[in-house]
Image (spheres, grey):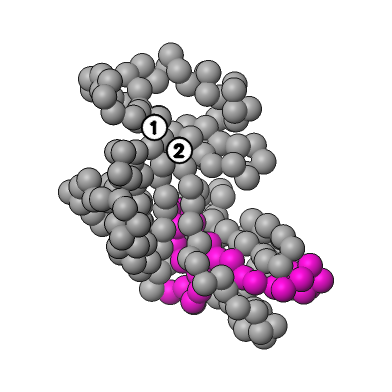
Amino acid sequence: MSDNPYTLLTAAEVTAAVADPWRVIANALQVAYRTRNMLTGGRFVARIIDAAEEANHHPDIDLRYGSVHLSLITHSEHRMTDADVALANRIADIAREMDLEPFAAPPARFELAIDALDITAIRSFWKTILGYDDDPDDTLDLVDPTGILPAVWFQQMDSPRPQRSRMHVDLWLPHDEVQERMAAAIDAGGHLVTDAYAPSFWVLADAEGNEICLCTWQDREESD
């Protein structure tokens, strides 16, 4: 029998239970609030820390001038749990009490994907030149040790593609924002390459064929 004190939740369960404006991005909960100045941001962070200590469950916090950015995941499980939802909802209450507004733009997560025939042959180069570490959670390949720069993962190629870019951007968005973002990108001169994998991800490209995947948590439910 497991000693795990948390209840693991699927992305769909988290989405149904968490308060606005939190959103599921990949395998974590994220939100960003406008605080207008550093003093208000510091007070907000102090209240979040008090709530986190009381819950014995801690978010990742990024305090900037005029904003606070938050991410929640149960790091010991590399998954979202009922504890993440409970703390996210408490933080949403604190923000309302302080009359803080979320960013108009939804939270997002940026990753760089590199296609390769021989991943082993190129992995060390990218790890060294970027100064990255191996991902301790084993969900990606390489991560910035400061947690600031985008993660990198390698995608296995079956055959050479000399006429196609072998790098592309993965942009994780809230599932309820992706259609609007996609429509805006197409209006801005892009085009849809394929929706064969939707709603897990859509592949779009600019006018010269440079690709980006718009990714959501949907159709990626974790197996227990």
43 w.r.t. 141: above or below: below
Type of amino acid at the residue the image marks with label 1: Met
Residue drawn 48% across and 65% down?
Answer: 106
Residue extending furthest toward the top: 121
Q: Give percent across and percent down for residue 105.
A: 50, 67
| Point 40% across, 45% down: residue | 170
Q: Does the magenta stretch include residue 29?
A: yes
The label on residue 112 is 2
Q: The residue tagged with tag 1: helix, strand or loop? A: strand
Q: Residue 167 carries which label?
A: 1
Tell me the crowding category of disc 2: few under 14, some 14 to 19, or many 20 or more residues within 10 angstroms, Cα based: some
Q: Residue at x 49, y 52 (%)?
A: 109
Marks 1,2: beta carbons within 8 A: yes
Could one spot residue 87 in this view of the protein? no
**In this view of the protein, which residue sits in the foreground, 178 or 224?**
178
Image location (x, y in percent) of residue 8: 44, 59
Which of the two discs, 1 and 2, labels the residue nearer the N terminus? 2
Distance, label 1 to label 2, CA atoms, is 7 Å
Could you tell me which residue is drawn at 70 percent across and 83 percent down? 98
Query: Is 121 a magenta residue?
Result: no
In the displayed structure, 203 sits above or below 25; it is above
